[in-house]
């Protein structure tokens, strides 16, 4: 009796580091056409699963290993992911196989969302190696690196260089693709080059037919904040939110992001308020941040303490002697009271700035100088503090 | 003449039934009123007799080391434990056959108490994919229990018999889906107009069943415990209790959308909740396995879904709606359920037992239905060389599902090399052409007594009898002389001194508790 079943159904091993083509051959592609992949995976799995109940104990164990291998290989071909729970003595298989650009983006996106940048970069590099430095492969590599630096998951300078080169190539090759601009500008910001980033956003705005994306606005905003141009940052923040208006999910994300950027900046740059003009800048930025945060609960939380402080920071607090004030009021038939009140009071921000050391403090003084929300508003790590409350 | 009983010796539960000469079948309950006996054995400390059933199952929480369960999975092998270690009580190894014998003895006691007469004869059911070694081990378990095992019958055949005997003359092709506590079995059979049943394909998984689903739930319980910094697996009693709770939860989820149980780990109570959809999520891989086996069995039987006229579900785990939906999707038919999912295999076995014993009233409807024929559960063949690839492979001479007795199935082979004086004949059981997946039953040289040319003919003949006796004969293709005879008498794990010791042990037991 000679075997009639196709050889690929019987094959039970994949060499370590098997190529994409080898993996397809494991499932009979070729000789079968590409669209038979799913059918062949099912057929092979079923055939081997049936062997797991054969009447040879060692055979059953071997069949179980092959079924596990088939499942892992199929998973890789279908989804580009691995099942780390696997193991056993089955040969390892490459876990990042892609055939089309769509596959590539799906795979690297999955890795990035799983915070597995090592794998995402490896797959993107494989695309560069397989397809050469094309617009597509460069775009993918630049995106992975830019996202990694944006989130703080990547810090290696050499990677920054590699990603920047890829981003510049991608922008040159596909200037009409917003994602390439976003990656490039993001990487410029990661290199602490807000000047160049600002110029690049201007360039992108002129090049992109649909105008800047919400993300490009956010990147520009970051550049403006980096250049200490708060006014322009606020304007750009509002534009970012307006650009995202057509997509509710995106808008929520944008609201959250721009609010976070504004709050971080005003916490570190505008507090404590040291002058009347400083107070004006602070109030303006808090107002803008409050507007940007509307509807995004976590963003509203970020700005809440600042709104409370902004509502009180400009109000005057009596800091003089209560006894003297009463005495003078009685002596002058209460005519001195408003004059004395004004003369011996300060704006709340000034009271807070002067601190608790002031001798004749009052209840109002304590209220504006010591509550936790005011402390929080002044803390540069505000969100972390709130999170820890 | 003594009554003859039908016994479903299940992985997790066992049942005994009897059919009277008028065709009325009765499932026999124990003194506690339970008709289903958990296949669990507990060995009390000291000199006490072993305990089988619910009390033993309950004991697993307190003394898990002295409780044996799932031993059917190791039938015909040295052990049933996943770690390959033998199950030992007080320094003595307890084989799956001995443990099964205790369950059989307990079932026999239930019937003796009920009828007030000794139980001596029985027909016992086994999964369709059981090989001959496992079937032989089942017979030995019966012998140890003091039973004369009249026949070993496939579980799906018994289930189909129990379900279909009131509708004789309805032909068709039926798919029997038997998902029990520890094993999964799918069988496709043709039903003749005379009520005869011919199996055309079987498949299954000997380690897939309700117990595995319980395990999935227990794993989730362990995760819940670990969130509270507790280790369920470190607390043996808590773990055993979790298994009992998991089984209850699983049953409830066949009826309810969600259920909950209170488990106690390290003295801390934990409220465990599980919805049906979550449970189905846990079952994902098992559902895939069941789908694979079912479709593969249909493919190997050469059956399209449209050709299946009836789908019969049996086994307690068939209650799980996800499996019902899966089967409906595969076959395009709404499954029929056996009347009593847990009892129909025993009922079918009882019907067959009475019918085969010749005690049935010839006027009954049942008497007119021909009994199912025994078939080979696995193919039989020899090891041969593929002349093109020079690779060894299993050459099947009698395919699986061939009715027995199967007399003189033969195949012609040729010598591979010039000047060969003999051929080593290896007798295999299994249908796969890959030798890794078959069992070698025996071997021996077929000596020509001279040098023969390349391509010299060798005739190999294999026969299988009703009693399970397998014979291979190799003949000189030209002189017709018999060169080798290999006769297989199943070498069971429990043989010789071990068997005598087991018999002595069984004799010592006054009454199974």
Image (tube, helix red, strand yellow):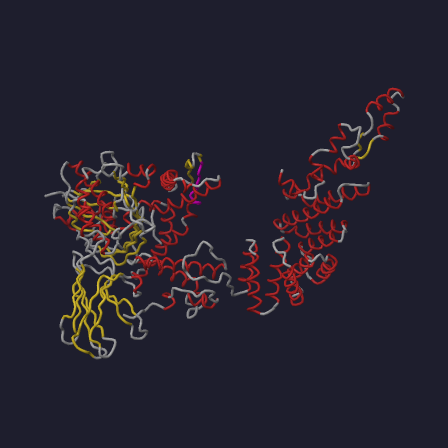
Answer with left or right where residue A337 lies relative to residue B282.
right
Which segment did they paint magenta? B270-278
In the rendered view, tell whether residue A199 sits above or below residue B111: below
Observer-nearest of A292 and B360: A292
Q: Which quadrant: the N terminus of chain B?
A: top left
Q: Is residue A342 magenta?
A: no
Quick one: which residue is furthest to the left in this view? B1
In percent of width and height, residue A325 lies at 84, 24
Q: Which quadrant: the C terminus of chain B?
A: top left
In percent of width and height, residue A209 lies at 69, 62
- Examine the image and state in which quarter residue B342 appears: top left
Quick one: which residue is furthest to the right in this view? A332
Tell me which residue sits at (22%, 73%) in the image. Answer: B413
Please give the count of numbered marks on the rendered protein.
Answer: 0
In the rendered view, tell whether residue A111 sits above or below residue B52: below
In percent of width and height, residue A161 lies at 65, 62
In percent of width and height, residue B250 lies at 37, 42
- Examine the image and state in which quarter residue B101 appears: top left
Quick one: which residue is furthest to the front in this view? B91
- Examine the image and state in which quarter residue A174 appears: bottom right
Answer with left or right where residue B387 lies relative to residue B118.
right
Main SS of the magenta segment?
Answer: strand
In the rendered view, tell whether residue A21 sits above or below residue B209: below
Q: Is residue B276 magenta?
A: yes
């Amino acid at each position: 009796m000679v075997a009639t079943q196709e050889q690929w159904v019987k094959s039970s091993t994949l060499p370590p580091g098997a190529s994409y083509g080898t993996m397809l051959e494991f499932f009979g592609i070729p000789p079968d056409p590409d669209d038979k992949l799913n059918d062949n995976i099912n057929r092979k799995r079923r055939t081997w699963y049936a062997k797991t109940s054969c009447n040879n104990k060692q055979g059953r164990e071997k069949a179980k290993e092959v079924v596990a291998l088939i499942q892992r290989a199929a998973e890789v071909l279908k989804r580009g992911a691995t099942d780390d729970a696997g193991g056993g003595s089955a040969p390892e298989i490459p876990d990042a196989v892609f055939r089309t650009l769509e596959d590539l983006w799906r795979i690297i996106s999955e890795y990035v969302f799983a915070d597995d940048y090592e794998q995402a970069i490896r797959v993107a590099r494989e695309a560069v190696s397989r397809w050469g430095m094309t617009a597509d492969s460069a775009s993918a590599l630049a995106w992975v690196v830019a996202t990694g630096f944006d989130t703080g998951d990547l810090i290696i300078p050499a990677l920054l260089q590699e990603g920047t080169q890829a981003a510049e190539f991608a922008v040159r090759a596909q200037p009409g693709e917003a994602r390439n601009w976003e990656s490039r500008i993001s990487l410029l910001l990661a290199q602490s080059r807000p000047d160049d980033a600002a110029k690049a956003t201007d360039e992108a705005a002129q090049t992109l037919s649909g105008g800047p994306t919400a993300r490009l606005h956010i990147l520009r905003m970051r550049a403006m904040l980096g250049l200490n141009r708060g006014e322009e940052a606020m304007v750009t923040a509002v534009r970012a939110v307006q650009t995202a208006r057509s997509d509710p999910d995106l808008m929520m994300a944008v609201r959250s992001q721009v609010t976070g950027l504004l709050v971080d900046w005003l916490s570190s740059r505008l507090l404590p308020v040291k002058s009347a003009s400083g107070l004006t800048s602070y109030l303006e930025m808090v107002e803008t941040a409050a507007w940007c945060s509307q509807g995004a609960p976590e963003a509203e939380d970020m700005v809440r303490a600042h709104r409370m402080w902004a509502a009180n920071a400009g109000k005057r607090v009596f800091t003089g002697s209560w006894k003297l004030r009463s005495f003078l009021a009685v002596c002058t038939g209460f005519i001195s009271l408003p004059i004395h009140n004004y003369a011996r009071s300060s704006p709340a921000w000034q009271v807070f700035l002067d601190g608790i050391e002031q001798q004749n403090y009052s209840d109002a003084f304590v209220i504006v100088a010591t509550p936790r929300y005011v402390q929080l508003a002044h803390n540069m790590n505000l969100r972390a503090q709130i999170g820890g409350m | 003449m003594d009554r003859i009983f039908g016994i479903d010796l299940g992985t997790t539960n066992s049942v005994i039934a009897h059919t009277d000469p008028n065709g009325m079948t009765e499932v026999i309950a124990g003194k506690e009123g339970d008709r289903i006996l958990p296949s669990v054995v507990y060995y009390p400390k000291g000199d006490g007799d072993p305990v089988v059933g619910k009390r033993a199952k309950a004991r697993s929480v307190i003394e898990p080391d002295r409780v044996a369960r799932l031993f059917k999975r190791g039938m015909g092998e040295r052990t049933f434990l996943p770690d390959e270690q033998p199950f030992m009580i007080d320094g003595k190894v307890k084989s799956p056959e001995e443990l099964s014998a205790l369950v059989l003895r307990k079932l026999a006691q239930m019937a003796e108490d009920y009828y007030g007469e000794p139980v001596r004869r029985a027909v016992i059911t086994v999964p369709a994919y059981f090989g001959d070694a496992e079937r032989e081990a089942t017979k030995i378990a019966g012998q140890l229990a003091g039973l004369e095992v009249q026949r070993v019958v496939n579980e799906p055949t018994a289930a189909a018999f129990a379900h279909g005997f009131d509708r004789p003359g309805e032909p068709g092709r039926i798919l029997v889906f038997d998902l029990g506590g520890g094993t999964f079995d799918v069988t496709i059979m043709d039903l003749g107009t005379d009520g005869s049943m011919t199996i055309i394909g079987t498949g299954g998984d000997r380690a897939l069943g309700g117990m595995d689903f319980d395990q999935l739930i227990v794993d989730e319980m362990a995760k819940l415990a670990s969130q509270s910094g507790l280790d369920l697996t470190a607390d043996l009693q808590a773990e055993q209790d979790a298994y009992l709770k998991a089984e209850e939860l699983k049953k409830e989820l066949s009826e309810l959308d969600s259920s909950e149980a209170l488990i106690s780990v390290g003295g801390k109570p934990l409220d465990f909740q599980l919805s049906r959809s979550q449970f189905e999520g846990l079952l994902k891989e098992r559902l895939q396995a069941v789908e694979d086996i079912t479709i593969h069995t249909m493919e190997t039987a050469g059956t399209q879904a449209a050709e299946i006229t009836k789908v019969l579900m049996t086994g307690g785990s068939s209650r799980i709606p996800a499996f019902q939906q899966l089967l409906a999707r595969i076959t395009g038919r709404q499954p029929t359920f056996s009347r009593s999912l847990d009892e129909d295999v025993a009922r079918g076995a009882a019907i067959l037992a009475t019918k085969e014993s010749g005690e049935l009233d010839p006027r009954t409807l049942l008497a007119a239905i021909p009994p199912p024929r025994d078939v080979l559960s696995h193919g039989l063949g020899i090891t041969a060389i593929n002349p093109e690839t020079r690779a060894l492979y299993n050459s099947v001479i009698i395919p699986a599902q061939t009715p027995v007795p199967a007399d003189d199935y033969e195949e012609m082979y040729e010598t591979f090399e010039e000047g060969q004086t003999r051929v080593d004949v290896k007798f295999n059981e299994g249908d796969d052409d890959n030798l890794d997946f078959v069992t070698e039953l025996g071997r021996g040289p077929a000596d020509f007594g001279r040098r023969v040319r390349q391509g010299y003919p060798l005739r190999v003949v294999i026969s299988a009898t009703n009693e399970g006796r397998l014979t291979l004969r190799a003949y000189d293709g030209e002189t017709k002389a018999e060169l080798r005879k290999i006769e297989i008498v199943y070498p069971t794990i429990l043989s010789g001194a071990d068997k005598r010791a087991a018999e002595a042990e069984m004799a010592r037991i006054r009454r199974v508790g």
